[in-house]
Amino acid sequence: MEKKRVILFKKSDDAYRNLFEKQYKPDFIPVLDHALDNVEALAIILSQGPQDCKGLILTSQRSVEAINQAYNICRMTDKTHEEWNTLPIYIVGPKTADVLAQSPLFQSHDHRHWVIAPRASELIKDLLNSSHYLFLAGDKRRDLIPEALHEAHIPFHEVQTYATCPHPELKNRMKHLDYHEGEWLVFFSPSGIKFIKDASPDSMSTLFGGLFRIAAIGPTTADFITKDLNFQVDVVADKPDAEHLFDAMVQFDTNQ
């Protein structure tokens, strides 16, 4: 029996591919791209040192990329380098921490000063124990951390280090995409769906018109589809990872 195709609206990912190939035929369509922002401004901040900043907040690997580019163009004394390396760092996501560990600015960092949490919500408690942060984030960042700091009257300086934009291949991929009834379509973010809509406005009724099974990586994406677009979602992953998404889809197909 031929495997059912699953179209995942994200860049190719080995973890997803290896898992989904057990049951399906995965096809990846990259939707999002990122452009670094305010690198020169960040370079000035790095060269001046932490000053009265008591901690650094990082929520994305993209911000680490911005740090690396800024570090490459800034002038920094050994003393300032050491000041950054003794600064507590609050990190969302183990992958972000792994990338940071390879950063030329923080390779010598005492990692015991790092606080790593899988989700932003799990970082809040630790953030409330200090004061005055440098917060590096993207243009689509959630309000969770800033709101928690505001409510606790903890000052922070936010720098937008990257902006989310449509992938350069998206429009062409959507134009030449062939559809077959009963296939799975998997969506990963509201911003991604908006870019798909912008790239191919006429495809929305086809994508969500009932010919395909619709899966969402989490409740935020599912809510956008159901409440903002008024379309149906068949499956929502219990946790936003490949395993839980795969399990939910297989369970749905088994019950049909």
Image (cartoon, helix red, strand yellow):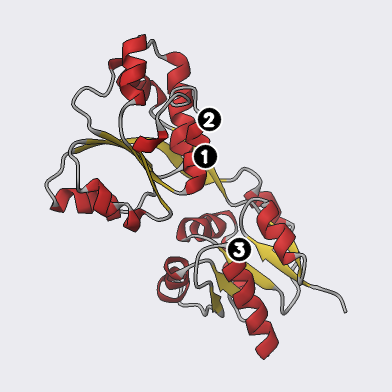
Q: Nearer the viewer, mark 3 or mark 2?
A: 2
Quadrant in the picture for residue 20 = bottom right
- Asked whether residue 213 appears in the rendered view, the answer is no
Label annotation for residue 102: 2
Looking at the picture, which amino acid does disc 1 mark?
Asp
Earlier in the chain: of badge 1 and badge 3, it is: 1
Earlier in the chain: of badge 3 and badge 2, it is: 2
**Residue plotted at (52% across, 54% down):** 195
Looking at the picture, which amino acid does disc 2 mark?
Gln
User: Would you place residue 72 above or below residue 239 in this image?
Assistant: above
Q: Position of residue 248 (x, y in %)?
A: 60, 77
For the N terminus, the image quarter is bottom right
Q: Nearer the viewer, mark 1 or mark 3?
A: 1
Furthest residue to the bottom?
Answer: 256
Q: Position of residue 93 (x, y in %)?
A: 45, 49
Whether tag 3 and tag 2 are in contact, CB under 8 A, the answer is no
**Residue plotted at (44% across, 20% down):** 71
Disc 2 secondary structure class: loop
Q: CA distance from mark 2 to mark 1?
A: 7 Å
Give the residue number, with chain letter if any, for mark 3.
Answer: 242
**Residue plotted at (74% across, 57% down):** 176
User: Would you place residue 17 above or below residue 239 in this image?
Assistant: above
Give the residue number, with chain letter if any, for mark 1.
Answer: 98
- Asked whether residue 66 appears in the rendered view, the answer is yes
Q: Nearer the viewer, residue 140 or 170?
A: 140
- Give neighbour class at mark 2: few <14, some 14-19, many 20+ (Cα, 10 Å): few
Looking at the picture, which amino acid does disc 3 mark?
Ala
For the C terminus, the image quarter is bottom right
Disc 3 secondary structure class: helix
Q: CA distance from mark 3 to mark 2?
A: 25 Å
Indicate left or right for 234 with 90 as reference.
Answer: right
Whether tag 2 and tag 1 are in contact, CB under 8 A, the answer is yes
